[in-house]
Image: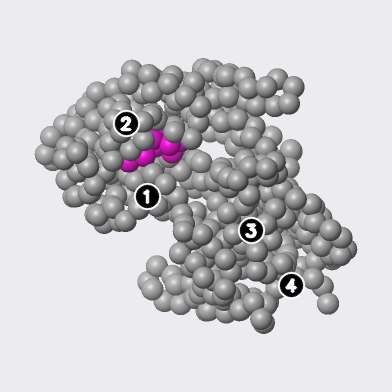
Amino acid sequence: MTHRIVIVGGGAGGLELATRLGQKLGKRGKAHITLADANLTHIWKPLLHEVAAGSLNSTENELNYVAQAKWNHFEFQLGRMSGLDRERKTIQLAATLDEDNRELVPARELPYDTLVISVGSTTNDFGTEGAANHCIFLDTREQAERFHRKMLSHYLRAHAGKGDNDQISVAIVGAGATGVELAAELHHAARELAAYGLDRIRPENMRISLVEAGPRVLPALPERISAPVHRTLQKLGVNVMTGAAVKEVTADGLILANGETISASLKVWAAGIRAPAFLKDLDGLESNRINQLVVTSTLQTTRDENIFAFGDCAACPMGNGSERNVPPRAQAAHQQASLLVKSLTLRLQNQPLPSYTYKDYGSLISLSSFSAVGNLMGNLMGSVKLEGWLARMFYVSLYRMHQMALYGPFRTLLLMLSDRIGRSTDPRLKLH
């Protein structure tokens, strides 16, 4: 019987793994590859802040799983994982409902010989009172589009003379990469909206507050990166507040731990991550306090060698003697997907599996059209700091590398040409 590999989660890592395994094993009939995801389409998660600001039209940058499966010799199953039976080697997929709440796809089971879990992460609000009710998270395309609609509604009401005032206030909790990039992108969007005639709210009247509990923005990156980013945000008029922990979120804004209040009609929570709740105690698999599945250096779960996990949903040792876990970054998921292509091929041959060691190739932060800052790291050049146009080009290349892994060089080149042509005929900002 053909070996059955089931991959749960079609994020960047899971989709890349399914695509490459389909080309390597599925095409030759050496294994049957199945990808399961709760959505029909994929969009690269680091782009969601651009979707929220309207700088990116998500429908033009999404990938359809059904088509990708056909082109790359794997099977796609629509459904959200709801359970696991390790003894019977099956996973349960919950029923999928349509927009009228009718059953579109029934609940069902999928058998596996090897299971790979790559369901990513969600935003962690740390149980902050009111955050779940009053903040928008940016974990999914739907959430990003919801924020964009709310922001655009403010501008349209003001343009029609129906708004309460001619300003808009946005509070972003968390000054990691998502929060910083969203703040800059919103400032860019304010300029574009005014240029298109929605100028009752002037760019300077979009009040953006970036609130960080830690001592500086981009706390996970070196200070030589965070310092120029902080200065650029301040030049753009963003109210950057560090050392400011949020105690409560209300309908009208934020209440800080020191009692200070920040008024905001739109609130985004972009601080912290955790793995999906269903992974906690999933049929006896070991998990940590933020629901990540604990894995060994081979990316196998500690209590079942037939189950692998990688990306943000896995607590994986860093390697090289470090006691820390691999950080939840896109480059880590890409590295782990590449390793698993080799590992699962070796597993079919009953060969020993290689161990994963995290390699940090640096970080890049985009400040919309205004600037970009980052550092590249390598064995030959050490750590090189980048700023401005060059950093921006490297940042854009990250998305092109993602497309290359999914589409191949030729189709990626066609997509680049299509994007170039589209920029000359489409609005620079999504206006609906």
Residue in the image at 50% along x and 31% along y: 221
User: In whole angstroms, how far apart are the C-alphas of marks 4 and 3?
Assistant: 18 Å
- Residue on which the image places disc 1: 137
Side of 318 relative to 185 (left or right): right
- Amino acid type at circle 4 is Asp
- What span is colored magenta in the figure? 172-183
Residue contact between numbered discs 4 and 1, judged by CB atoms under 8 Å: no
What residue sits right under mark 3 in the picture?
A: 295
Mark 2: few/some/many CA within 10 Å (<14, 14-19, 20+) = some
Residue 427 percent across, percent down from the top left: 42, 32
Q: Answer with mark 4 or mark 2, whichever residue precedes in sequence.
A: 4
Q: Is residue 200 within the magenta segment?
A: no
Nearer the N terminus, badge 4 or badge 3?
4
Nearer the observer, 294 or 70? 294
Residue 180 visible at all:
yes
Real-space CA distance between mark 2 and mark 1, rounded to the nearest whole angstrom = 20 Å
Q: Position of residue 357 (x, y in %)?
A: 70, 44
Residue at 62%, 52% in the rendered image:
316
| Residue ID for mark 4 | 113
Q: Secondary structure at mark 4?
A: loop
- Whether the residues at callouts 1 and 3 have beta carbons within 8 Å, the answer is no
Q: Which residue is mark 2?
A: 242
Apparent side of residue 365 relative to residue 161 in the rendered image (left or right): right
Q: Residues within 10 Å of mark 4 (few under 14, many from 20)?
A: some
